[in-house]
Amino acid sequence: MISRATIDRIYAAAIIEDVIGDFVHLKKSGSSWKGLSPFSKERTPSFFVVPAKGIYKDFSSGKGGNVIDFLMEHEKFSYPEALRWLANRYNIEIEEEQQSTEQLQEKTEREQLSIVTEWAAKWFQQQMIETEEGQAIGLSYFQERGFRPETIRTFQLGYSPDRWDALIKAATEAGYNTEYLIKTGLVKEKEDKLFDFFKGRVMFPIHNISGKVIAFGGRTLRSDKNIAKYFNSPESELYVKSNVLFGLHLAKNAIVREDVCFLVEGYTDVISLHQAGVENVVASSGTSLTEGQIRLIKRYTPNITILYDGDSAGIRASFRGIDMILKEGLNVKVLLFPDGDDPDSFARKNSSEAIQEFISKNAQDFITFKTSLLLSETGGDPVKKAALIRGIVDSIALIPDAITRSVYTQECSRLLQISEQVLLTELNKSILQKLKKDKEEPLPILDEPEKSGIPENDYVQDEINLHHQERELIRILLSYGEYPITIVAKNELDELEPMTISVSEFLITGLQQDEITLEHETYRRILFEYIEFIGREEFPEVRAFTLHPDQEISGETSRIVTSQHQLSSNWKIKHNINTETEDLILKKSATASLFRLKLRKVIQEIQRIEAEIKSTEDPASVDALLQEKILLDKVKARIASHFGTVII
């Protein structure tokens, strides 16, 4: 188990905007950073990172939290995995504490799958570099393709021995459970017999965005046509192929820097281009392009250039992918390499500068590409030409931006020598048909945005509603604890006079005077630690809690401080709305939170007494309970009458 001291060092070192910036293309926005949500499909950025508080908030999905929460949500890491990933990023040595048998057994299945997969990647590399078979077959293959040693290391290429049980034996000897070997797809079971799935293949590890190995592609070196050229890992809890792009972990920074993503088909295409110095390249890994993969690219750039090898069948099949890219609102260009070349072979024959220059000069926008390609096939047949025009118009109709649609329509008119008005008429028909189709389809059931687990309305069962009041008090304490407010209090002469104190002093004193203890365990611990800070005569920063090593405290704090929405000043001016923001009505808010909590406590106690009265038969006991209830009813009325009157 990771020691508390190590956890503290990890939290202290982690820069949230840098870490999240590895996964989301962020732009500075005042004191915050913003970008497109990585958790939902959106065109307008509503994802914010607030460095001052050490938190992120995604308003489109409702998700939020600290840097650990983000890694756990986005990468599906467990808490220890997220800590280890950050420790590795910031070169922090992890101190381990002895784990009990029970703790070891509590490791999640995902952790076990990840551990086995990472072990297998290292084992495949070792087999290629350190064994005669691996050097003669695997290493020589990669060398023949022109891959340099540093490239082989960067992509963690390897080799699986040509034996049915080589990996099984090695994994078993290393103490790995066969169950996880099967679930990762490294081992298959047939007729109660186990065998290595990738036997006799060169190995291409597939990484997630953060660089962890999550799956493999294996290429056979045999010429037997009855054997599949490539095997890929089956989908698992680690690997969902529609949401993964080969090489993205190495390409993402270059994609942002160059503001364009080159999309190719195969593993070797990516590797050769990367080795040639063209790093902003990814592959769909032999699968058809998916919406998930397109949205991955969209996080880093709105521009995609698809690189093809000139195979007409493959190009035709790509039209669906181009339409999907257009539908997502991205700009797409297409490049065909000279006959006989693909991205891999072209990269091996040319320098980085030559490749970039060739792409720059020859990449075509999709409308020019599709028109020129298909127009040559119509052979002057007016029926075929009409079908071509309708197909192009249908593609243009998918583009969400009206201006971009208009520009493409003009270009299509010029290339096809047809009236722009005719094209606009057909375009409008296509758009209307699409809208009609979308309307007929059942609406998807959206997941409700994540909440803190505490309902927001007052008309719920008392215990939960009490937690809601406690949550509101903690929110104000954390967000505005050091703010000064003026209260009316009695002086030494028992006279009422104004007095300036902090919000935290007002709230904490109010709780202590009536000996109120918070019932929600996490809120109680937050309050206790806050009081410890006050005892040291210092106000804690929100980061002390959002980055707290205790996951319950950090998670709940992050949800609390990101739960409020405020109208922007521009929006209020535009709509002539005079709205008090929370800092302007802080005096009212602090009083209301404290008194509502007190009121809820009194109501809870009254309900307890009423229940006792119903179950008590002794007249004297009933009389005593009734007297107690009368007093509490008076307290309840007095508290209710004080809302908004104590603070001036």
Image (cartoon, helix red, strand yellow):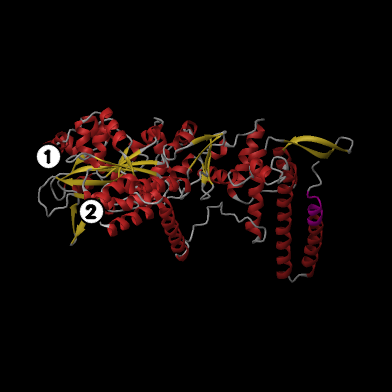
Amino acid tagged 1: Ile
Query: Callout 1: few (<14), some (14-19), or many (20+) C-alpha neighbours within 10 Å?
Result: some
Relative horizontal placement of residue 169, taking residue 35 as reference (left or right): left
Q: In the rendered image, which quarter contains the N terminus?
A: top left
CA separation, marks 1 and 2? 49 Å
Q: Residue furthest bottom?
A: 617
Decide which of 181, 280 is in the foreground and name it: 280
Amino acid tagged 2: Gly
Q: Which residue is mark 2?
A: 379
Q: Position of residue 65 (x, y in %)?
A: 52, 43
Q: Which residue is mark 1?
A: 137
Vertical relation: 51 (above or below) 242: above
Q: Which residues are magenta?
A: 636-643
Relative horizontal placement of residue 101, taking residue 506 as reference (left or right): left
Give the residue displayed 29% in from the left and 52% down from the top: 288
Tell me if residue 521 is in the magenta stretch: no
| Residue 27: assigned label | none
Determine if residue 452 is in view. yes
Which quadrant of the view contains residue 567?
top right
